[in-house]
């Protein structure tokens, strides 16, 4: 999960990150809206609290006897409340002239409003001597034809402290309840999306298996979402066309090579029947060069479609021995010695024997053709590499990489001998297909060149036991 989530190119990762971002924005927005709603509700609640205090004092007023015009009979709870409230909660009772009849022990009566024209707006605010802000309300109290005013006020500090306690309590509950909920929601979303993406991931794994070596392979379309099926159908159709095109091109090349080989073989046989003359010898060499070129073109075609090559266990020492055996008559004809190292121990690799054969032969032909007359060629196996040494001119360092390029030839003389300059490029491609490499180095004694075909050798006993 972690690796997939960290992969920025993953569609699942992108969707999850977007959902996570939307969820965070939703949570923040929700908390802002809830907090604003709570704050507005608490503001209304604060106003109601002040008004309820004024109504509670109003309900404690009684008509007075004798000289007393009015009596304030507060309950025990109210008296205790105002006694402990300090300056945060205050009240004042006035008559119609503004004369103060009753007030709380801690109050600023001089800061309360003294004029009540119509009580259209009974709420008021003022600032106390200590800088505290107060909000209050005035309530009209008619009694026996007379008018009295009850005023109650409280500090905004007390109201804010009260509202903050409520807000914090509500928000904390929302957090404790909401956080697990959103975490569970994200987990459920991830599980749902992961299961929903399984058909697409399965199709992606099937796409990785597509190979021209198996042209009939198709990605199963069952259980795929409708949104993905057109895409998979297009892939299957395109792969069918590509595989058919590659197969037809490969068959065409092989057929052409076969059709060219037959007349060339007949032509060479007819030339040999004419007898040994300088002209017939030259024509025979040309026919051999054309045959070699046809074989190289066939090898190039096979190597271009490396996915269609069937790899199997190959004894590298046996292939090298076969090449030496087939080339032995040519070395004898050139009065040239072919010196072999010990090749009794099997060296197993996975590959295609015919391609490996031609790669080794191309290197040995190159050594034979570019060595001075009657000079030997050394061949052997060192560890996991085939070593071919000639005794020709040392290839300059700046030209060593170029000789393995297609159509590259060292000189016009080499072109006449070796043909189109495809041999070593075929060797390079063959080694790449087999997971190996080819390079050329000057001999230690400075006389000649050493070609090294380095293969990835594997456990031959394991290979033999599995076959």
Image (spheres, rainbow, N blue to C red):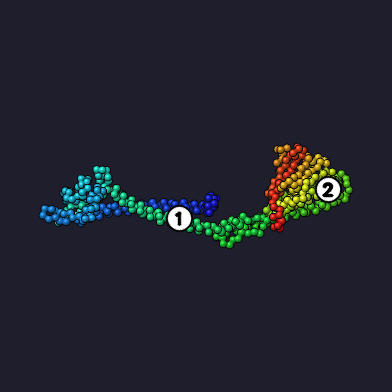
| Percent position of residue 224, x then y | 56, 60
Pick the front one: 427 or 314:
314
Q: Looking at the image, how many numbered discs can be counted on the residues?
A: 2
Residue 300, which numbered label? none
For the view shown, which residue lies furthest in the bottom direction? 222
Residue shown at the point (78%, 44%) measured from the top left:
378
On screen, residue 112 versus residue 41, left or right, reads left
What element does badge 2 sit on? helix
Classify mark 1: residues with Cα within 10 Å, few (<14), some (14-19) or many (20+): few
Relative to the observer, which residue lies in front, 345 or 392? 345
**Residue plotted at (69% across, 52% down):** 459
Residue 288 is situated, as x and y percent measured from the top left of the image, at 81, 48
Mark 2 / mark 1, whichever is N-terminal: 1
Q: Quadrant of the C terminus?
A: bottom right
At numbered mark 1, what does the secondary structure look like: helix, strand or loop?
helix
- Residue holding disc 1: 183
Foreground residue, 459 or 52? 459
The answer for how far apart the CA atoms under marks 2 and 1 are is: 80 Å
Q: Is residue 347 visible?
A: yes
User: In which image quadrant can residue 370 be found?
Assistant: top right
Give the residue drawn at x 78%, y 54%: 259
| x and y percentages locating residue 322 in the rendered image | 78, 51
Rendered position, 118 above or below 391: below
The picture places residue 131, in percent across and down from the top left corner, at 27, 43
Along the viewing direction, whichever of 358 and 324 lies nearer the viewer: 324
Residue at (72%, 47%) from the top-left corner? 383
Residue denoted by label 2: 329
Q: Residues within 10 Å of mark 2 (few under 14, many from 20)?
A: few
Contact between marks 2 and 1 (CB within 8 A): the answer is no
Q: Examine the rendered structure and indicate whether residue 450 appears above or below residue 322.
A: above
Left/right of residue 248 with respect to residue 91 in the rendered view: right
Residue 152 visible? The answer is no
């Amino acid at each position: 999960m972690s690796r997939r989530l960290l992969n920025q190119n993953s569609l699942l990762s992108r969707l999850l990150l977007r959902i996570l971002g939307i969820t965070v924005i939703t949570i923040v927005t929700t908390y802002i809206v809830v907090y604003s709603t709570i704050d507005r509700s608490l503001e209304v609640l604060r106003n109601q609290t002040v008004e309820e205090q004024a109504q509670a004092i109003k309900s404690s007023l009684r008509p007075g006897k004798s000289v007393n015009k009015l009596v304030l009979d507060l309950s025990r709870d109210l008296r205790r409340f105002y006694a402990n409230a300090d300056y945060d909660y205050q009240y004042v009772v006035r008559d119609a002239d503004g004369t103060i009849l009753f007030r709380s022990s801690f109050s600023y009566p001089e800061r309360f409003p003294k004029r009540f024209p119509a009580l259209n707006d009974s709420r008021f605010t003022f600032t106390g001597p200590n800088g505290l802000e107060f909000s209050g309300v005035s309530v009209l109290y008619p009694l026996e034809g007379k008018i009295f005013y009850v005023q109650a006020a409280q500090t905004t500090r007390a109201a804010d402290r009260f509202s903050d306690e409520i807000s914090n309590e509500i928000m904390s509950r929302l957090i404790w309840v909401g956080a697990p909920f959103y975490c569970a929601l994200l987990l459920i979303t991830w599980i749902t999306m992961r299961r929903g993406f399984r058909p697409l991931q399965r199709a992606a794994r099937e796409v990785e298996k597509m190979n021209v070596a198996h042209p009939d392979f198709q990605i199963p379309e069952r259980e795929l979402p409708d949104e993905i099926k057109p895409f998979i159908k297009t892939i299957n159709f395109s792969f069918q066309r590509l595989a058919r095109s590659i197969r037809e091109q490969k068959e065409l090349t092989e057929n052409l090579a076969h059709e060219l080989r037959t007349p060339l073989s007949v032509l060479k046989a007819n030339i040999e029947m004419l007898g040994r003359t300088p002209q017939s010898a030259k024509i025979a060499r040309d026919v051999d060069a054309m045959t070699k070129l046809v074989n190289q073109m066939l090898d190039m075609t096979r190597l271009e479609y490396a996915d269609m090559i069937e790899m199997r266990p190959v004894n590298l020492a046996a292939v090298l021995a076969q090449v030496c055996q087939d080339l032995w008559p040519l070395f004898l004809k050139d009065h040239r010695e072919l010196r072999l190292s010990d090749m009794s121990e099997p060296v197993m690799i996975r590959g295609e024997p015919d391609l490996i054969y031609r790669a080794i032969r191309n290197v040995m032909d190159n050594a034979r053709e570019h060595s001075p007359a009657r000079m030997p060629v050394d061949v052997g196996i060192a560890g996991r590499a085939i070593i071919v040494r000639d005794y020709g001119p040392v290839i300059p360092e700046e030209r060593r990489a170029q000789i393995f390029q297609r159509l590259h030839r060292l000189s016009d003389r080499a072109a006449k001998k070796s043909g189109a300059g495809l041999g070593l490029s075929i060797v390079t491609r063959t080694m790449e297909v087999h997971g190996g490499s080819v390079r050329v180095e000057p001999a230690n004694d400075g006389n000649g060149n050493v070609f090294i075909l380095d293969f990835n050798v594997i456990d031959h006993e394991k290979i033999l036991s599995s076959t």
